[in-house]
Image (spheres, helix red, strand yellow):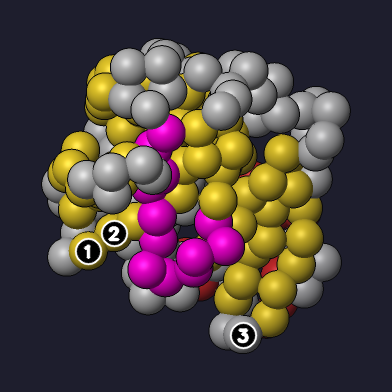
Amino acid sequence: MRYIVFSSADPKDLLMIGTRALILYTQNGALYLMDMKTFEIRKIANHLSWNTHTGVRAMRSPNGKKTYFKLAESLGVINVSTLQIERYMGSGIVSTVRLSPDGKGFVWPVHNPNYREGKGVYVMNEDGSEIRRIASIEDLYELTQNKDEFKPEDMEVQHPKWSPDGKYILYNSAQFGHSQLYI
């Protein structure tokens, strides 16, 4: 049996996992799976985090055994063999999440000063354990060359990404329309 999960936002979001073609598709905040032979559609998750430009931003594990998708404030994990949701993890994650190249962890920005240790860049293990902040807004502010133009509370961390070898994280910090990159 072949399955497809597709995205109304971007039909090019095709994930080839073994013999299965998976595309994440959201409609009214739900995730659907479609059998490519029978075209049978089944709902597999509700309350997804999605937008009209990017859909649900699926991530595939490097070994192809799992697919991750963003919910409103957490991550969902689909076991590709069973096509079932394995677990939900990372309560309070409201931003874009990126999987490390080795599949062992995630990184995401936090804009809420009341989340755990406050605003900054966070990481966690693939299983949802050991959530920790690796850089605070104050840390990033100290690295900024134009500190005289704004205050730390004016900064917002955006778009963290892992380096291809997984040793570094690149992220963007924006304030008043100006951006800076950090590693």
Looking at the image, which is closer to me, 51 or 162? Answer: 51
Visible in this render: residue 28? yes
Question: Which mark identifies residue 26?
Answer: 2
Q: Is residue 180 left or right of residue 62?
A: right
Q: Cβ–Cβ below 8 Å for labels 2 and 1?
A: yes
Type of amino acid under label 2: Thr
Residue on which the image places disc 1: 27
Quadrant of the image for the C terminus?
top right
The 10 Å Cα crowd at callout 3, few under 14, some 14 to 19, many 20 or more, is: few
Quarter of the image holding residue 29?
Answer: bottom left
Q: Which residue is drawn at 29% across and 59% down?
A: 26
Question: Which mark identifies residue 171?
Answer: none
Q: How far apart are marks 2 and 3 (CA)?
A: 31 Å
Q: Is residue 135 left or right of residue 169?
A: left
Quadrant of the image for the N terminus?
top left
Q: Principal SS element in the magenta part?
A: loop
Q: How far apart are marks 1 and 3 (CA)?
A: 32 Å
Type of amino acid under label 3: Gly
Task: Return the disc, 2 or 3, that comes first in the chain's sequence.
Answer: 2
Visible in this render: residue 128? no
The 10 Å Cα crowd at callout 1, few under 14, some 14 to 19, many 20 or more, is: some
Residue 14, image x and y in percent? 55, 51
Q: Give the range drawn in magenta.
A: 2-13
Q: Residue at x 17, y 65 (%)?
A: 28
> What is the secondary structure assignment of the residue under circle 1?
strand
In the image as oriented, which residue stretches furthest toward the bottom? 177
Q: Residue at x 71, y 29 (%)?
A: 101
Question: Which mark identifies residue 177?
Answer: 3
Residue 2, image x and y in percent? 42, 33
The 10 Å Cα crowd at callout 2, few under 14, some 14 to 19, many 20 or more, is: many
